[in-house]
Amino acid sequence: MRILFATDASDGALSAARYVAKVFPLDAEITLVNVLRNPVEYFPDAAVAYNPDIWRQEGMKFSQGVFQTTREALGGRAVKEIFREGVPHQVLLDMSRDYDLVVVGKRRKPSLSRLVLGSVSQSLAHNLQVPLLIV
């Protein structure tokens, strides 16, 4: 089984990692993916100071910490790690074609934030062509 595991090392993602470690066999192939959005999408005025190369380098450093924390929650399983830039739900939709299952942790956002910002898991639930596990 090939599992695409979206992680940001949040409480929800780490809970999902611990669940996957308990439920799925050791021979399951797990790929961790951390997706960071371009900061200019949130703060258009930041475009003046935005340097894509520095953003990518810092994003990759940040992702290494995310991956380390998630690996620990998975009980030290061997995993593949992928850092991506983009809109999280779209990146995951595109990547999911090569996997049997997509796993995400549930976010505990206030309902107004979810209404305004949307939800990665909600978007995936409506658009994925493979099974989705939300923990």
Image (spheres, rainbow, N blue to C red):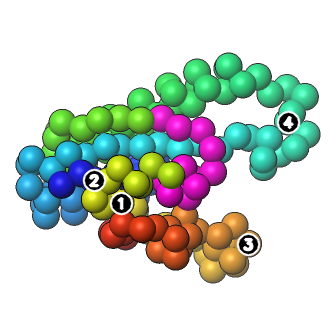
Callout 1 secondary element: strand
Task: Please name whichever residue, 36 or 10, is drawn nearer the observer in this view of the structure.
Answer: 36
Hey, what amino acid is under mark 1? Val
Determine the residue positioned at 72% across, 25% down: 52
Q: CA distance from mark 1 to mark 3?
A: 24 Å
Q: Nearer the viewer, mark 1 or mark 3?
A: 1
* Residue that label 2 marks: 3
Residue 78 is at least partly visible in this image: yes
Label 2 close to label 3 by CB (< 8 Å):
no
Hey, what amino acid is under mark 2? Ile
Relative to 96, say whether 49 is above or below. above
**1 or 3: tag closer to the N-terminus:** 1
Determine the residue positioned at 21% across, 59% down: 20
* Residue that label 1 marks: 102
Q: CA distance from mark 2 to mark 3?
A: 29 Å
The magenta segment: 83-93
* Residue that label 4 marks: 46
Q: Is residue 87 inside the magenta stretch?
A: yes
Residue 59 % position (x, y): 57, 30
On residue 116, the disc is 3
Callout 2 secondary element: strand
**2 or 4: tag closer to the N-terminus:** 2
**2 or 3: tag closer to the N-terminus:** 2
Residue 40 % position (x, y): 80, 41
